Amino acid sequence: VDGEASVTSYQGDGGEVVIPCTFEQIPVTAISAFAFAGCDNITTLTVPDTVTTIGNSAFFGCTALSFLTVGVKVHEIGAAAFGECTALTNIAWNAANACGFAAADQAFAHAGTAKTGIRVVFGDSVETIPHHLFFAEGAAPNITAVVIGKNVTSIGDYAFPFCGCDSLIIPDR
């Protein structure tokens, strides 16, 4: 799209990956389907505030990914975008108003299957936790702790089904 850039593939060394806000002075607004799929050397991922769309299976099978930060403007996340990210232990979710998911999308299917599970922190920029965010029937992510930001006013249906959360922190109002 004119005036916008997409990340279409990755061939780096892994470790800590920060998706750039711009590419040749053009804002990076999307991560294409399968762009990072199968990259088993990425341990930390930061999606910047300029990104609005994460494609289907964009990070599917990133089995070493343990820490994920989702930027403020992310609005759409495709099916299985973070599926099979088995080492995931921390998600910093800052997407202020991400749209809901279809039950079949299963964006985080089989994520965080390590014994420690996943700690999800919804930042203060978040107003709505989308419906079906962590829905994955028969493949639920292992979410063990959730921290709700002070500006969350709505939690969508089935946002955390089948997750077995041990800890929920809700701020005083």
Image: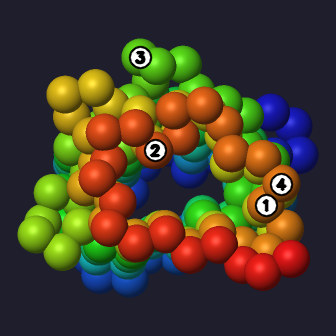
Q: Is residue 40 above or below residue 54?
A: below
**Amino acid at dot 1:** Val
The residue carrying mark 1 is 152
In three-dimensional space, the C-alpha distance between marks 1 and 3, rounded to whole angstroms, equals 25 Å
Cβ atoms under marks 4 and 3 closer than 8 Å? no
In three-dimensional space, the C-alpha distance between marks 1 and 4, rounded to whole angstroms, equals 4 Å
- Locate residue 10 relative to residue 87 in the image: left or right: right
Q: What element carries label 4?
A: loop
Pair 1/3: label in front: 1
The residue carrying mark 4 is 153
- Locate residue 25 relative to residue 23 in the image: left or right: right
**Amino acid at dot 3:** Ala
For marks 4 and 2, the one nearer the N-term is 4
- Judge whether residue 36 can be spotted in this image: yes
- Judge whether residue 37 can be spotted in this image: no
For marks 3 and 2, the one nearer the N-term is 3
Say which residue appears at 72% left-offset and 72% top-offset: 149
Query: What percent of the width, then of the height, locates residue 17?
Result: 43, 76
Query: What percent of the width, then of the height, locates residue 158?
Result: 51, 32
Cβ atoms under marks 1 and 3 closer than 8 Å? no
63 or 30, nearer to the observer:
63
**Amino acid at dot 4:** Thr
For marks 4 and 3, the one nearer the N-term is 3
Which quadrant is home to the C terminus?
A: bottom right
Q: Is mark 2 on a helix, strand or loop?
A: loop
Cβ atoms under marks 3 and 2 closer than 8 Å? no
**Amino acid at dot 2:** Phe
The residue carrying mark 3 is 104
